[in-house]
Image (cartoon, rainbow, N blue to C red):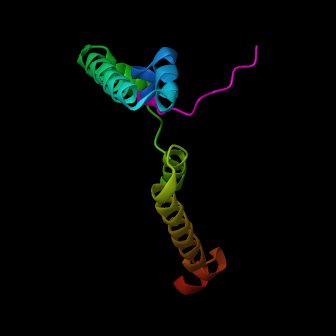
Amino acid sequence: MNEEQISQTLLDQMVSSDREQMIKAAIPYLPPKGQQIFSVYEKAVEFINTVSVFSKRSSGSDLCAMSMPAQNPVDIVNDIRSFCYGPSRDKLNQMVNMMAMVQMLQLMNQPADGEKEDSHE
């Protein structure tokens, strides 16, 4: 069976379930009072699950085990950007572009191997 993946952060994957995601997806279709009740309910459940995850003794190591290895800052920002939208995503796009420009400038300012040898003579 081909399952479509929902874009969720690692923390969201740890503290929520498919059932909670379905309820969140249904909230816009409810009457205003139902939207309010179910929104507060889902956030409360998410909060309780988050507290539970971090209060377990082993969960700290679980989170560390699931954490990503050290990466290039541009890669980290690109990963974060995939969970953003609107103005936040635009700002992260600008940040990635600036970081790429800085990396290019650093590469351009590095002396070539032949230039290093000539300067020491």
On-image quarter of the C terminus: bottom right
Please, is residue 41 above or below residue 67 in the view?
above
Which residue is more in the foreground, 67 or 109?
67
Number of marks in the rendered image: 0
Residue 101 drawn in magenta: no
Q: Is residue 70 visible?
A: yes
Please give left or right for residue 69 compared with residue 63 in the image: right
Q: Position of residue 63 (x, y in %)?
A: 38, 25
Magenta highlight range: 1-11
* Identity of the residue drawn at 38% across and 19% down: 62
* Identity of the residue drawn at 43% across and 20% down: 16
* Identity of the residue drawn at 49% across and 48% down: 84
On-image quarter of the N terminus: top right
Residue 3 drawn in magenta: yes
Residue 35 sits in which quadrant?
Answer: top left
Which residue is more in the foreground, 62 or 5?
5
Please, is residue 111 above or below residue 36 in the view?
below
* Identity of the residue drawn at 47% across and 62% down: 91
Secondary structure that dominates the magenta span: loop
Please give left or right for residue 64 compared with residue 121 in the image: left
Q: Position of residue 37 (x, y in %)?
A: 33, 24
Please give left or right for residue 107 compared with residue 71 in the image: right
Please give left or right for residue 71 compared with residue 117 in the image: left
Q: Position of residue 64 (x, y in %)?
A: 38, 27
Q: Position of residue 97 (x, y in %)?
A: 55, 67
Q: Is residue 121 visible?
A: no
Residue 40 sits in which quadrant?
Answer: top left
Which residue is more in the foreground, 78 or 46?
46
